[in-house]
Image (spheres, rainbow, N blue to C red):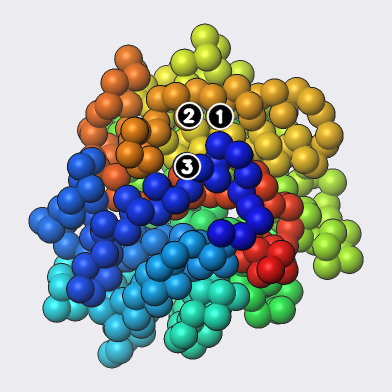
Amino acid sequence: MGPVPDGERRELLVPLLEFAGRSRLERGFGHLRRDGTVDSARGLELWVNARMTYVFALASLLGVEHASDQARHGVDALTGLFEDRVHGGWWSTVDDAGRPGSATKSCYDHAFVVLAGATATVADVPGAAALLERALRVHEERFWEEPLGRCMDQRAGDWSTTEDYRGANSNMHTVEAYLVAADATGDAVWRDRALRIAEHLVHRVAREHDWRVVEHFDGDWRPLPEHSRDRPADPFRPYGATPGHGLEWARLLLHLRAAHSLAGEASPDWLLEAAVGLVERAAADCDEGRTGFPYTTDWDGTPVVDQRFHWVHCEAVLAARALASATGEQRYADLADRWWTFTREHFVEADGSWLHELDAGLAPAGVTWPGKPDAYHAFNALLLPSLPLAPSAAVALRSAD
């Protein structure tokens, strides 16, 4: 294995990948149950396959055994099983014959195709460069809204209609994907677009809401603070504020700030200010008693869905670690250490796999996230603390060889 990560995280990385490898099917990757068997009833999901491709591409750059083959398997699935050769883009779900299980295409899923394609391109996975080229073209032509500088959320499979909804979650992952795409292609337009998305959703809207991220908007980008009140635990569009997304945004803002600096470009002062505001808000709302972060809160910070998700705690650790790096303040390093201790104690199982959900009493649960569908957040939590904030992980790992 390559030079990173170190210590405990290094020891946890290989068993996590071995468990994740059980999701491999003849075509693509399936959704894993808690015991590591594939839940065939769910079909094949694009976001899972794209995330797994991203993870194994990075693992290949670490020199993890079999990771290169797994990454190639993922690229093959994305360029074959999921891709719509008639209308372009990628289906959100398919069966093992490639028949779509939904009639729509989503920005969220397509952002992960860009992320997977860009990461696999840097890792020299066969077919990845062509995948990235098509994914960026589709994202630009079908989801990017110019001159607004944001992305629409969901469209019909033939692109004929667009849902009257806009979401922060899909745009957040677009920021992530565009940052990696900028590194993979050398084209600064993707970094510039990432900044434009963040400027509206964080610098303007989240600031106006006391650094709680507004997740839902109508088709004209008017906030919908009551959206999903009838389904507060929805896995992708929950009601209220999502502290984990505030933490994830904070980390991405610091990656964006560092990327501009590395490129010799001035970055706005608000990026650091906003990252601090988001982390401090999440900590103030959720960290009292040190029993972890709830999934969602109301607009006054009161927990709504009190489940504990692994991805939220991964992002807490990463955001605090990124702030410690950006500011040099020991407070954030201490928070990162404390949040990592909680995460390690409560989410990592004996076989190295990670529980995805706990109830309010910290017992394993599966109300919103049954099973262990992917290794994306856990892998990031193990890898990214050992890397600089810029360039993106794949480029940093390739440069370390």
Residue 176 visible somewhere in the drawing: yes
- CB-based contact (under 8 Å), mark 3 and mark 2: no
Identify residue type, mark 1. Answer: Trp
- The residue positioned 23% from the left and 48% from the top of the image is 36
Identify residue type, mark 3. Answer: Leu
Q: Quadrant of the C terminus?
A: bottom right
**Callout 3 crowding tier (Cα within 10 Å): few <14, some 14–19, many ≥20:** some
Percent of width and height locating residue 246 = 57, 37
274 on left or right of 38: right
Circle 1: element type? helix
Query: Which circle marks residue 340 in the picture?
Result: 1
Identify residue type, mark 2. Answer: Thr
Quarter of the image where one finds residue 400: bottom right
Mark-to-mark CA distance, 3 and 1: 13 Å
Circle 3: element type? helix
Percent of width and height locating residue 384 = 62, 49
- The residue positioned 40% from the left and 25% from the top of the image is 346
Residue on which the image places disc 2: 343
Residue on which the image places disc 3: 12
Please tell me which residue lies in front, 213 or 310.
310
Placement of 168 over or under 283, stated as above or below? below
